[in-house]
Image (tube, rainbow, N blue to C red):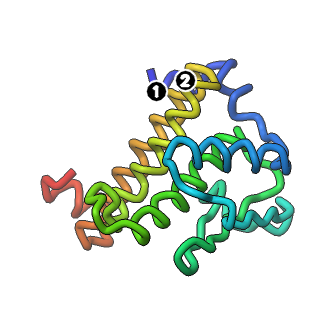
Amino acid sequence: MIGSAYGARAAQRALAEQPVTAAGIEEAREYVSSLMDVDLSTVMVEVVSNSKWGDSGAEGIHFKAGLDQHLIVMPSYVASAIEVLVHEFGHAAHAIKQRQNGEYPCFFTADGTVELISHYCQHHYIVERLSRDHLLIALGQLTTASYALSIQASGTKDFDHYEASGAA
């Protein structure tokens, strides 16, 4: 289902690039703030023109700074812009919760946990406000990200060696 979603016409519409807007930024901020019960008002968002973006592997980037001053950098146009912003605000929410509250063991700093929290926010948003096609595409991205993180965690730089190791 995930593989076929990428080729479906509805999924291609779901993946059409949209502008990152001030209204979309605030919708994503408010959504994740409410979902994760965290104040994200100090998280800054910088929008960079696509011609200067230069990172074809990322739709958005989150940088941690201080207890709650974080920065999200986004290209000016991206597929499913608010969904991507929700994911990036999920990273900020995770970092803030983790730093403010040592009593929440689910907010570990491990890369896999960080990614799962942001995908939780993203998938929750998709189920509430977007389409089945958005969800299937996001599940494919989660699978890919999880696989990549497990390769990184294994310490190998050789993909063939990783697959042969049985850790896959």
Residue 76 sits in which quadrant?
bottom right
Residue 96 picture location, percent across and down? 49, 66
Kindly give the residue lying farthest to the left in the view shown: 166
Q: Residue at x 60, y 55 (%)?
A: 89
- In the image, what residue type sits under mark 1? Ile
| Cα separation between marks 1 and 2 | 5 Å
Residue 146 picture location, percent across and down? 36, 50
Q: Residue at x 50, y 35 (%)?
A: 123
- In the image, what residue type sits under mark 2? Ala
Mark 2 highlights which residue? 5
Along the horizontal axis of the image, is 81 left or right of 135? right
Q: What SS does tag 1 mark?
A: helix
Q: What SS does tag 2 mark?
A: helix
Mark 1 highlights which residue? 2
Q: Residue at x 43, y 69 (%)?
A: 100
**CB under 8 Å between discs 1 and 2:** yes
Q: Which one is in front, 127 or 11?
A: 127
